[in-house]
Image (cartoon, grey):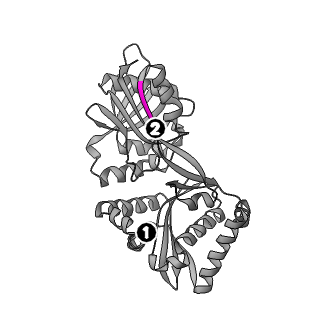
Amino acid sequence: MAEVSAFLNSAYTVKLETLDSLTNYWEHSDYCLHWPSLFSTPFWMGVWSNSFGCDQRLHIVSVYKGATLLGIAPMMLSDDTVSLIGSSEMCDYLDFIVAPDKGTDFFEGLINYLKEIRVKHMALMCLREDSIAISELVPLARRKGFQISLATDDVSYEMGLPASWEQFLELLNRKQRHEIRRKIRRLEESGNIRLRVIEGPVSARESFPDFLELFRLNRIDKAAFMTDTKAGFFRKIAVAAAEEQMLRLCFLDFEDRPVSAALCFNYGSTVFLYNSGYDSRFSNLNVGLVCKFFSIRDSIERGSLNYDFLKGNEIYKQRLGGHPVRLYRCKIDMDFIR
């Protein structure tokens, strides 16, 4: 780490960081930082930047006030614009990594630094409505008179999990409860089924081709989406998550062959449903939905407290009890003063 700037007549100090030094912060809880989501972890940012050739644009800084670490800005720098590390295609949420109750101080120091290195624009995306960027950075930017563009970008769905599968079913309306039981029963009556969960890095490497095949068999547009580069990213992120003990790659086997899959990640007390796929030849048996049902049941049985369906307005997320979370994109022009 190299100190970049100790601002004149200011207590703020900014230090350049690397993904390796970021990992050090991540592994040591005594830094008391809030890592807002799976997509803000060092291993996720590392795999993403390496997969998509963005290493040269990384500009990660930590902001201190005196000896106190206020937070970390995991940014990319392009000309006079900074953004957060990640992309909307691969990262559902992005945000800054800030110590509790230090948001205003952190952003004050960060803005001072960005103006010093002649950054004029902040282009931020995938911001949850409860992100610290929305709750702390945007109000501070308004107070400073910067020009702000804030627009709804997408919606995500999440839900709390009860203590048992039966309690989960009771939370749903009568029609949805009946439909879930009917779909599971119909599949069970059609043949032998089981949920197989992959957790370790070796088994993740061995099983991932099956996930990619199911993803591509799902729909034509999903097959077109999954380029070789994106497939490489998916594979690497699954293995990296397994090494962090965060992978839950769920396969629904029908008559001993995988017919659907749900790529999930554990983060804290939350399970994230990152992506899924199924063999469309078995669509009449609703194998895609049943795999998701089983993933939720598995999460409950393992004591998870929340299930996050992530981005997308698919109707099944609402029917299964998901609550909407708005996502925003925000542009802040720091060289424009009202």
The image shows residue 335 at horizontal and vertical percentages of 34, 22
Residue positioned 30% across, 63% down in the render: 227
Could you tell me if residue 65 is visible in this image? no
Residue positioned 64% across, 57% down in the render: 321
Classify 3 as above or below 249: above
Q: Which residues are magenta?
A: 147-151
Specify whether 26 is left or right of 318. left
Specify whether 316 is left or right of 121. right
Residue positioned 28% across, 30% down in the render: 80
Q: Hey, what amino acid is under mark 2?
A: Ala
Specify whether 53 is left or right of 330. left
The image shows residue 155 at horizontal and vertical percentages of 51, 48
Classify 294 as above or below 5: below
Residue at image mark 1: 204
Q: Hey, what amino acid is under mark 1?
A: Ala
Residue at image mark 2: 151
Magenta-drawn stretch contains 150: yes
Magenta span dominant secondary structure: strand
The image shows residue 15 at horizontal and vertical percentages of 37, 31
